[in-house]
Image (cartoon, rainbow, N blue to C red):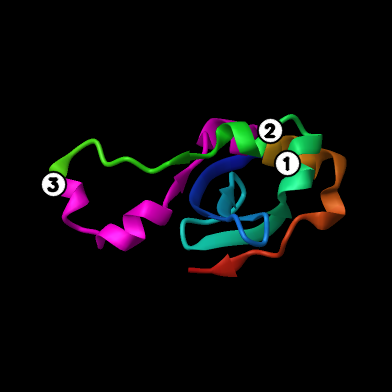
Amino acid sequence: MEILEIYHYEVNEQLKTVEITFRLTSDSDDESRVDTFEFSILNEYGIEIGDEIEDFVFESEEYADEFDDEESEDWIMLDEEELISFLNEYYTINPKKLPEKTFF
């Protein structure tokens, strides 16, 4: 079991959670898994969420036009390589907590 890629993640600062949509190497292209983690779990595994959160800044005006200004202020970026590493370690230690796969 290994995480192949992260499709999407969303940080909810109010609830102090991160919802992650990802795919395992054993999942087909049209399958994904979704799990939600509290900041405290991420912190236990070495991801200091307070240090990792930074406001999303568009590097290109081309992409900035695709989003409403209010929306873009709420975007938060995390290091996806660190999230993949976290997921791999978490599910190695807690294999029964691996979410069921769903179809896209």
Q: Main secondary structure of the magenta part?
A: helix
Please state the extent of the stretch shown in magenta in the rendering.
62-85
Residue drawn at point x = 64 percent, y = 64 percent: 101
Disc 1 marks a residue whose amino acid type is Leu
Q: CA distance from mark 1 to mark 3?
A: 33 Å
Instruction: Name the residue furthest left.
Output: 62
* Among numbered discs 1 and 3, the one appearing first in the sequence: 1
Is mark 3 in CB contact (under 8 Å) with mark 2?
no
Residue under label 2, please give it. 47
Is mark 1 in CB contact (under 8 Å) with mark 2?
yes
* Numbered-mark total: 3
- x then y, percent, for residue 94: 86, 46
Q: Secondary structure beneath disc 1? A: helix
- x then y, percent, for residue 10: 53, 56
Residue under label 3, please give it. 62
The one nearer the camera, 30 or 73, is 73
Q: Secondary structure beneath disc 2? A: loop
Q: Is residue 70 rendered to the left or right of residue 82?
A: left
The one nearer the camera, 97 or 16, is 16
Instruction: Name the residue furthest bottom.
Output: 103
* Among numbered discs 1 and 2, the one appearing first in the sequence: 1
Residue drawn at point x = 68 percent, y = 33 percent: 48
- x then y, percent, for residue 30: 47, 63
Q: CA distance from mark 3 to mark 2?
A: 32 Å
* Among numbered discs 3 and 2, the one appearing first in the sequence: 2
Q: Is residue 69 magenta?
A: yes
